[in-house]
Amino acid sequence: MNMIKVVVNEALSSNIIDVNIRDFLINKFPWVPVFYLLPKIHKQTMAVPGSPIVSLSGSLLKPVAQYLDFFLKPFVQKIRSYLKDKINKIEGIQVNDGDPLLTMDVSALYTNIPHGEGRQAIQKYLDLRLDPDLPTQFLISVGYHFRTKLF
């Protein structure tokens, strides 16, 4: 039995979640995640580098990601650096004649977030919920399996 099933079934046994949430979180027919590269064709090098992508669509972790996103999204959207999308950022910007237009490239943004500090930040915000339907520890425990890859 995979670790996600163990955590989810323990939560069901402890009346932390109901059968509907358990059935949602446990993907009975998961697909193998697909790894691929998006080539960075704008780079001026001989060997075109690529951005590695692992698609979770249909995978064992997809429902867990959606579930955690539901609880974290309200907090993430309040963070000062939150950017909904590129269009959201450029709306309202006035460009005058002669203003330079610049772009930049961010490398390894998410891989540079230390796991321990990220987990502490998530726990802090989940503890701020005014109506915590679920214990923070359960949500942290389910999310922990993303980091450890025990599935």
Image: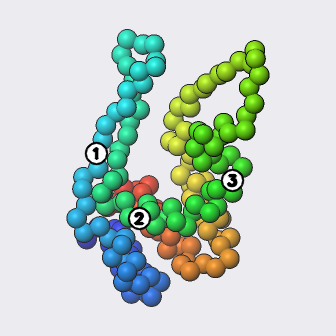
Give the residue type that dot 2 points to: Val
Res 105 → quadrant: top right
Asked if residue 114 lies left or right of residue 99, the reply is: left
Disc 2 marks which residue? Answer: 64
| Image point (38%, 64%), residue name | 63
| Residue in the picture at 53% in, 52% down | 115
Q: Secondary structure at mark 1?
A: strand
Q: Which residue is mark 3?
A: 79
Q: CA distance from mark 1 to mark 2?
A: 17 Å
The tag on residue 117 is none
Mark 1 surroundings: few (<14), some (14-19) or many (≥20) residues within 10 A: few
Observer-nearest of 7 and 131: 131
Q: Earlier in the sequence, mark 1 or mark 2?
A: 1
Residue in the image at 30% along x and 57% along y: 59
Residue beneath disc 1? 34
Question: Which numbered disc flags the more N-terminal residue, 2 or 3?
Answer: 2
